[in-house]
């Protein structure tokens, strides 16, 4: 709208006299990763990745179309509830004059931020995966990550191709998923694809996330006679499931459902037992694309742990915003939104590090070329093994 | 499916033992000082971090760290009593609840600031060992935790019922002024009670740290189970807390198997609600009219 | 003098409960303190045992200044205070209540004899030793409270209205027992009572308090025959 | 502790002619008038949103206070009613396109039913038993709402459908209408609770909160009085819960039915003053902004620092003012009234 | 004599084998003052608790005004018109004296103003007028007893059960309290009075009921009862004679 235009002019005129060229000192981007409460672990890591991205952007000369304007991050903690997220989002929008927002990673929180961003007409770029997010016809919402349902699909396709077809494992599947947005949206894709590909689903149940003992659950899996387990779990559950399956001598192959299976702590907790574990991922630090290795190495140097999927996506999302601003040559949120909607971030361009080719948004705001990958822990590192175009390593049986 | 029942019971009892020990600590503090400590789960968390860091720096077996973590936690509890809880001893239960809720928020976030949100685990050999007895698998680390729970609970119970100081704790709870007239130093008694409560709960943290992970909010779920358990057994009733813990553990295991994997807690809570509706002052109450 | 209270002042907010009371008790004496409601009797005992802190005044016990001491330290010095209104530990058994009476090391060493003695003084307590004290009748609780105080084996026993709520026969028995204890152990006693004749029959001397000060004092017989006392406290 | 005026003062107060000139009457009206002007002064919609939240929680605290403050039944399960109100309204809106204005009454009734169910078992319990029992109930609610996803949307939660600005559907793009609606609700609830407090049932609630045995001896039907308290409280809380859903746009069982939510509701009453009408409002004015401020200033410093400070402030507040902020404020207010009265007497 | 307002028939209350009240029967007649005495633990308070519904009796029946109130809840019993005080006082601690009594008065009226007026009268009646705005918790035990008395009176009972309301009063104060009881009686309220202070019992009771081991020991005119040997043996003690002589 025109009033928004005025806002950005205000900002520039305050610092420079109005010339022919849009020149501003900085562009404000709001960052909303939870760094307290039960979402803090990944939120903190993702926030670090955003900071790294901003440094990279600024080091590379900032936003050139705005005369080398620097990205200025306004970071805040949205906590872990819709209410606190709403407050944090509005605070950034109303008091910090942000041009764009990124963050959340938890789909529940993104449901809130996206609502507020939509009403305030501020572009919001996220890596949250829920299918629901991009199904609401929002104009200011952009999702760089694969959708939740695709994760399940990829898990099952991989199992079909590598386990059932190649290794002759019986297609008897147990699906268990945490009772969260993330769990249920992934599980839907799992079930659908498993049915399509002729799996016999012997168990399909949500479980209470954050349990203290996996034994009852594993008992149940054992009793079901499944040969392949598709768990959708966060870290703590993933560790206990993996450990307990082994200790109870359940003969089953696990194809993990992301998040928990990919974190450094998973390896730390399981030690050598982590090796060989397979999981789906929305991103991996070795995906076969240019530029990733450099980012991953620098991140590790700076923050002491490897770049996980959420952090990788957070890094990419920040660049998407930067490219959008560059293209819009304006700090006006609507202009930036329009630019992002038409943006194509190519491979090799900084931040174009999502699997599946160019970053390019469809009319729902979803990055339409992206897809999940499958990783396997090999010698203490998560290696991408599927699909073939992204793989850097062979599946070890 | 009946052959799975013994396994369910055993699993339930093993985790129930841990709930029991955490609950016993909570019950003690209530029984003596009349305070329900909503930061109780955070004692567990502190105990786990203490164990973890000692293990990291010295590499000794976590169970040996009890020698250090018990006194450290005892001191923590005693100091909290002296500087915090004591100020609300005579206040309404609500005031107490909210003081401890504040403490809970504080401790969780101080832990977050100090140790980050990372999940940390301790590696011990016996975590990898299981026994298989007639088709029932028993994880040794959980069995050890279970026995620690039983042992500490029995010691505590004997202390409270058989020693003068134990009885003096009860007396101090019932009537502080009169207890003082008997020559009982109630301030000291309360500090000791809070110390023991924290130490026992910290020890529970040590016991589970061999098969569970540590993070700043790890106390929340155990804390919740402890409140449920303690109320189920009757506040301040140690035996009740112990039996309640086992009961809740078993109910949860059965719930997962027969109601749904997301319904272990649901069943445990519903059983709790039904039992308490029948016996509103807890299963083992013998209250005074 | 075993106990000397000198010029004691206490107020609860605006209410002046004690206004310069002085009393003294010789070792082995038994004194009675009487006076109307709100005269300050209970307050005086609480001051001595340390439950309250005076705004002014001094207390020496056994040649030691005990003002400002915590009650548990006062108890350790040898003062037992049987408080007004029974105050038994309701959720402890009768036996455990008595055991709490002998919590201090000095009393603990003679615990079993003391218990035996209490049970001989109050057979009802032996009969009910495993009952929770809170479920005893009012009178039974009063017996327990007195017995618990005796368990401390104090040098000075202070009783606040021990006869309140007791059946006449029990009052009689209780005072007989107190006289017996007094005679046998020559334990020093301070008895606060509404039942003035009974108290003065036990005591050697008495103090009459009014509005927080000593109105009258003297030996028991004189007081019993004092017309003012007769009218106010004996009902003539 | 309430302050009972002596009967002479009473008579003076009820002497109708000087009604408006009495500071006891014109001060609240003045306050309300000022409140009506707030949106003119606070134009930043973030701050107005914060004020809306303060009003909402102040009102919820008053509703909670009926049970927790007057009858002294320590409920830590009020998120149940809050959540039921939010869910009922939102589901009716999503599935049947029923306006929240109507839906919220269904939510209220539904909450009352749940309250009665809870009351049947819960009212024989006291103090901490009651508290933990209500926590267990709220977990059961949370788990059921997660489990029956077909009906409730499960863990994925529900978005409140947005259709740009429509009074009939309780939808506004500006914060101002919300402000006036919330304020109206607050005023109505204050008036209701004030009336109740001065009625027989109010006295009965307070008496029960002090000593149930003694209350029975003067003929108070404890179960009935408590059910009434929980029923009224549940109804009001559910209505506010439906407002809350319209306010945050998105609800999901985990936070809606959490103990955290119950604690937030009760907290404003405790910090403000138990069993007082205006206490929770004062509490909300303090508690909610503190949470925001700590987050605003420490939210990007060190993870956890913001909440650590919040926890610390809670602890200190409870130790320093155990009877609630309303006590010193009331004293000042009384002083003000007395001074005004005296000056008007002189005139 | 007139009709009984309260009839207790075969009442028993056992606690784990302890027979606190044992097959007790007695009547209370309209307008009288019945004194109840008995050794400590003889079941006086327990009998009150059974009549007023605080305890569920093990056996027996209680009729009030001809209707059975056996097994009814305390609030129902109070609504029927039986008021009581507690041996261990139970004021509403955080409420003022006035508020305490007003709460009682609400049993018979819905209106705040009326309830407050009734309360004011009762408070004045028991002599607490100067403490009407004092918070109950800070009253002395004696004043708390007065408060309970006023609170019970405010419910406009037909029958009032008083459990040791005069314990701890000195002779002069007892006299004042007795006058109060007489005035209540003159208002037509029937009274059952438990006291250990013999002066009270002898000077106000029309009849005296003596309990021992939860059962009735005897019943009759005060003077007769006081000279009954079994009462002297179980309750009064041999010294009582000396005491009476002394006074
Ligand atoms: N906690 C208190 N708060 C305020 N005033 C008090 C308190 N305790 C006692 N008082 C007042 O102090 C004065 C003395 O009280 P105290 O209890 O010592 O009297 P007493 O002689 O023991 O009376 P009684 O015969 O009733 O036991 C009285 O005026 C009483 O009202
Ligand atoms: N709840 C209870 N549980 C067990 N025993 C009880 C209970 N209540 C009372 N008793 C016992 O019942 C007996 C009668 O008690 P009650 O209180 O009726 O005596 P009382 O006649 O009022 O005595 P007092 O004159 O001392 O007040 C006592 O022995 C008492 O210990
Ligand atoms: Mg006294
Ligand atoms: Mg009695």
Image (tube, coloured by chain):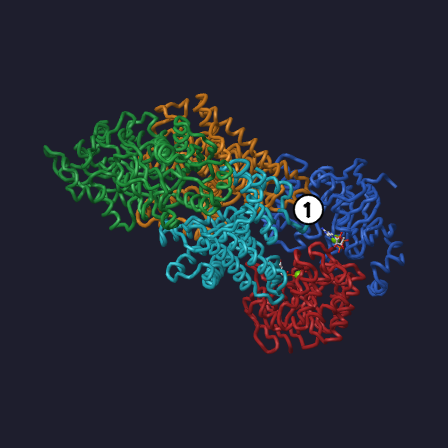
- Toward which corner of the image does residue A71 lie, by quadrant? top left
Q: Is residue B281 left or right of residue E172?
A: left
Q: Badge 1 sits on which subunit?
A: E
- Identify the chain drawn in orange: D
- Residue D63 visible? The answer is no
Q: Position of residue E2 (x, y in %)?
A: 86, 40
Residue sitting at the far left: A20
The residue closer to the viewer here, D261 or A305, is A305
Q: Position of residue D160 (x, y in %)?
A: 40, 28
- Position of the N terminus of chain E by quadrant: top right
Numbered disc total: 1
Q: Position of residue B126 (x, y in %)?
A: 46, 55
Q: Residues within 10 Å of mark 1 (few under 14, many from 20)?
A: many
- Identify the chain drawn in cyan: B
- Toward which corner of the image does residue A195 lie, by quadrant? top left
Residue at (32% x, 25% y) in the render: A137
The residue closer to the viewer here, D307 or E35, is D307
Is ligand 1 closer than 8 angstroms to the Cβ of mark 1?
A: no
- Residue C43 visible? The answer is yes
D253 lies above or below C173: above
- Position of the C terminus of chain E by quadrant: bottom right
Ligand 1 placement by image quarter:
bottom right
Q: Is residue E93 left or right of residue D320?
A: right
- Identify the chain drawn in blue: E
The residue closer to the viewer here, D283 or D78, is D78
Residue on which the image places disc 1: E150
Q: Is residue C194 left or right of residue B132?
A: right
Residue at (26% x, 42% y) in the render: A286
- Identify the chain drawn in green: A
Q: Colour of chain C?
A: red
């Amino acid at each position: 709208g025109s009033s928004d235009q005025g806002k950005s002019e205000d900002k520039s005129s305050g610092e420079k006299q109005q010339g022919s060229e849009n020149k501003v000192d900085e562009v404000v981007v709001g960052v909303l990763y939870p760094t307290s409460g039960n979402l803090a672990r990944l939120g903190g890591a993702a926030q670090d990745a955003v900071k790294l991205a901003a440094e990279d952007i600024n080091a590379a000369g900032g936003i050139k179309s705005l005369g080398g304007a620097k990205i200025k991050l306004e970071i805040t903690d949205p906590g872990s509830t819709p209410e606190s997220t709403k407050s944090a989002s509005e605070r950034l929008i109303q008091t910090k004059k942000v041009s764009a927002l990124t963050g959340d990673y938890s789909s529940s929180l993104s449901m809130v931020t996206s609502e507020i961003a939509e009403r305030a007409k501020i572009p919001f770029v996220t890596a949250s995966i829920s299918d629901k997010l991009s199904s609401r016809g929002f104009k200011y919402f952009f999702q760089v990550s694969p959708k939740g349902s695709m994760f399940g699909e990829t898990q099952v396709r991989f199992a079909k191709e590598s386990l059932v077809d190649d290794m002759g494992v019986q297609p008897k599947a147990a699906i268990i998923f945490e009772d969260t947005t993330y769990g249920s949206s992934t599980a839907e894709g799992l079930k659908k694809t498993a049915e399509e590909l002729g799996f016999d689903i012997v168990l399909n149940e949500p479980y209470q996330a954050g349990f203290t003992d996996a034994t009852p659950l594993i008992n149940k899996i054992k009793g079901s006679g499944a040969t392949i387990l598709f768990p959708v779990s966060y870290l703590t559950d993933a560790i206990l499931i993996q450990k307990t399956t082994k200790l109870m001598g359940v003969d089953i192959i696990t194809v993990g459902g992301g998040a928990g299976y990919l974190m450094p702590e998973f390896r730390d907790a399981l030690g050598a037992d982590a090796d060989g574990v397979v999981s789906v991922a929305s991103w991996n630090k070795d995906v076969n694309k240019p530029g990733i290795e450099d980012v991953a190495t620098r991140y590790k140097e700076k923050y002491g742990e490897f770049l996980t999927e959420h952090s990788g996506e957070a890094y990419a999302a920040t660049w998407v915003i930067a490219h959008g601003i560059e293209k819009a040559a304006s700090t006006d949120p609507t202009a930036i939104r329009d630019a992002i909607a038409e943006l194509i971030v190519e491979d090799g361009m900084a931040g174009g590090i999502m699997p599946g080719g160019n970053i390019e948004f469809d009319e729902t705001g979803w990055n339409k070329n992206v897809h999940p990958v499958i990783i396997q822990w090999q010698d203490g590192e998560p290696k991408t093994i599927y699909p073939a175009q992204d793989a850097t390593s062979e599946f070890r049986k | 499916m009946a052959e799975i029942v013994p396994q369910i019971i055993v699993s339930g009892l093993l985790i129930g033992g841990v709930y029991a020990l955490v609950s016993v600590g909570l019950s003690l503090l209530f029984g003596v000082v009349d305070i329900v400590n909503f930061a109780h789960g955070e004692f567990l968390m502190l105990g786990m971090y203490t164990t973890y860091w000692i293990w990291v720096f010295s590499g000794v077996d976590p169970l040996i760290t009890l020698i250090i973590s018990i006194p450290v936690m005892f001191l923590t509890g005693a100091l909290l009593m002296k500087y915090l809880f004591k100020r609300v001893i005579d206040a309404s239960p609500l005031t107490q609840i909210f003081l401890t809720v504040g403490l809970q928020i504080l401790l969780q976030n101080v832990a977050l600031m100090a140790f980050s949100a990372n999940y940390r685990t301790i590696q011990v050999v016996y975590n990898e060992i299981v026994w298989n007895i007639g088709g029932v698998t028993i994880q040794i680390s959980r069995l050890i935790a279970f026995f620690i729970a039983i042992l500490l609970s029995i010691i505590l119970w004997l202390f409270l019922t058989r020693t003068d100081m134990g009885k003096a704790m009860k007396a101090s709870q019932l009537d502080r002024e009169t207890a003082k007239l008997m020559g009982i130093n109630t301030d000291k008694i309360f500090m000791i009670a809070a110390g023991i409560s924290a130490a026992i709960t910290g020890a529970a943290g040590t016991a589970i740290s061999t098969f569970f992970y540590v993070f700043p909010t790890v106390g929340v779920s155990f804390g919740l189970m402890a409140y449920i358990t303690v109320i189920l057994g009757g506040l301040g009733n140690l035996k009740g807390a112990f039996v309640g813990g086992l009961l809740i553990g078993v109910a949860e295991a059965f719930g997962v198997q027969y109601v749904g994997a997301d319904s272990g807690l649901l069943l445990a809570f519903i059983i709790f609600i039904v039992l308490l509706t029948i016996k509103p002052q807890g299963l083992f109450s013998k209250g005074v009219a | 003098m075993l106990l000397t209270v000198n010029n004691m002042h206490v107020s609860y907010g605006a209410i002046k409960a004690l206004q310069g009371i002085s009393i003294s008790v010789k070792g082995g004496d038994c004194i009675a303190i009487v006076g109307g409601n709100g005269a300050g009797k209970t307050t005086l005992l609480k001051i001595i045992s340390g439950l309250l802190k005076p705004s002014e005044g001094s207390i020496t016990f056994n040649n030691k200044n005990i003002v400002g001491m915590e009650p548990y330290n006062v108890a350790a010095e040898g003062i037992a205070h049987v408080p007004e209104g029974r105050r038994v530990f309701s959720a402890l058994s009768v036996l455990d209540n008595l055991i709490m009476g002998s919590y201090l090391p000095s009393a603990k060493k003679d615990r079993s004899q003391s218990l035996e003695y209490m049970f001989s003084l109050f057979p009802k307590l032996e009969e009910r030793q495993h009952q929770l004290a809170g479920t005893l009748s009012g009178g039974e609780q009063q017996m327990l409270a007195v017995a618990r105080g005796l368990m401390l084996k104090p040098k000075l026993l202070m009783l606040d209205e021990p006869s309140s709520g007791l059946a006449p026969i029990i009052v009689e028995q209780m005072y007989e027992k107190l006289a017996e204890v007094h005679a046998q152990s020559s334990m020093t006693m301070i008895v606060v009572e509404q039942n003035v004749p009974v108290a003065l029959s036990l005591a050697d001397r008495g103090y009459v308090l009014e509005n927080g000060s000593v109105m009258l004092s003297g030996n028991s017989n004189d007081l019993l025959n004092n017309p003012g006392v007769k009218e106010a406290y004996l009902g003539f | 502790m309430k302050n009972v005026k002596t009967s002479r003062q009473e008579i003076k107060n009820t002497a109708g002619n000087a009604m408006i000139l009495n500071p006891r009457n014109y001060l609240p009206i003045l306050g309300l008038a000022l409140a009506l002007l707030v949106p003119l002064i606070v134009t930043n919609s973030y701050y107005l949103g914060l004020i809306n939240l303060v009003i909402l929680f102040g009102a919820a605290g008053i509703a909670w206070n009926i049970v927790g403050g007057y009858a002294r039944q320590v409920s830590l399960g009020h998120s149940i009613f809050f959540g039921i109100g939010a869910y009922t309204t939102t589901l009716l809106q999503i599935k049947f396109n029923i306006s929240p204005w109507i839906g919220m009454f269904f939510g209220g009734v539904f909450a009352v039913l749940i309250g009665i169910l809870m009351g049947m078992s819960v009212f024989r319990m006291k103090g901490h038993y009651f508290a933990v029992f209500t926590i267990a109930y709220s977990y059961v609610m949370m788990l059921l709402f997660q489990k029956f996803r077909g009906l409730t949307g499960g863990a994925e939660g529900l978005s409140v459908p947005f259709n740009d600005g429509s009074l009939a559907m309780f939808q506004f793009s500006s914060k101002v209408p919300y402000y006036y609606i919330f304020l109206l609700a607050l005023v109505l609830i204050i008036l209701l609770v004030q009336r109740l407090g001065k009625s027989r049932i109010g006295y009965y609630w307070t008496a029960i909160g002090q000593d149930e045995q003694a209350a029975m001896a003067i003929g108070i039907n404890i179960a009935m009085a408590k059910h009434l308290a929980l029923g009224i409280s549940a109804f009001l809380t559910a209505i506010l819960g439906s407002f809350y859903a319209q306010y945050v746009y998105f609800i999901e069982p985990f936070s809606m039915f959490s103990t955290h939510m119950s604690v937030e509701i009760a907290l404003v009453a405790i910090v403000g003053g138990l069993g007082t009408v205006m206490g929770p409002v004062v509490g909300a004015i303090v508690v909610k902004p503190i949470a925001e401020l700590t987050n605003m200033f420490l939210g990007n410093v060190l993870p956890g620092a913001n909440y650590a400070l919040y926890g610390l402030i809670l602890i200190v507040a409870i130790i320093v003012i155990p009877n609630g902020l309303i006590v010193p404020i009331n004293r000042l207010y009384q002083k003000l009234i007395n001074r005004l009265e005296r000056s008007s007497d002189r005139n | 004599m007139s009709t009984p307002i309260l009839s207790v028939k075969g009442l028993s209350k056992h606690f784990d084998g302890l027979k606190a009240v044992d097959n007790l029967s007695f009547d209370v007649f309209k307008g009288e003052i019945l004194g109840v005495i008995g050794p400590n633990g003889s079941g006086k308070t327990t009998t009150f608790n059974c009549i007023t519904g605080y305890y569920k009796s093990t056996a027996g029946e209680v009729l009030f005004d001809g209707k059975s109130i056996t097994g009814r809840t305390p609030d129902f019993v109070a609504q029927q018109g039986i008021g009581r005080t507690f041996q261990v006082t139970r004021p509403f601690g955080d409420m003022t004296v006035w508020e305490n009594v007003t709460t009682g008065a609400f049993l018979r009226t819905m209106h705040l103003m009326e309830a407050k007026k009734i309360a004011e009268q009762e408070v004045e009646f028991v002599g607490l007028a100067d403490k009407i705005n004092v918070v109950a918790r800070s009253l002395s035990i004696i004043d708390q007893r007065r408060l309970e008395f006023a609170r019970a009176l405010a419910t406009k009972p037909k029958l009032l059960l008083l459990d040791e309301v005069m314990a701890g009063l000195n002779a002069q104060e007892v006299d004042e309290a007795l006058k109060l009881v007489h005035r209540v009686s003159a208002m037509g309220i029937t009274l059952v009075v438990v006291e250990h202070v013999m002066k009270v019992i002898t000077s106000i009771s029309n009849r005296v009921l003596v309990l021992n081991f939860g059962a009735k020991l005897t019943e009759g005119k005060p003077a007769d009862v006081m000279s009954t040997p079994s009462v002297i043996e179980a309750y009064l003690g041999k010294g009582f004679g000396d005491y009476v002589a002394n006074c």
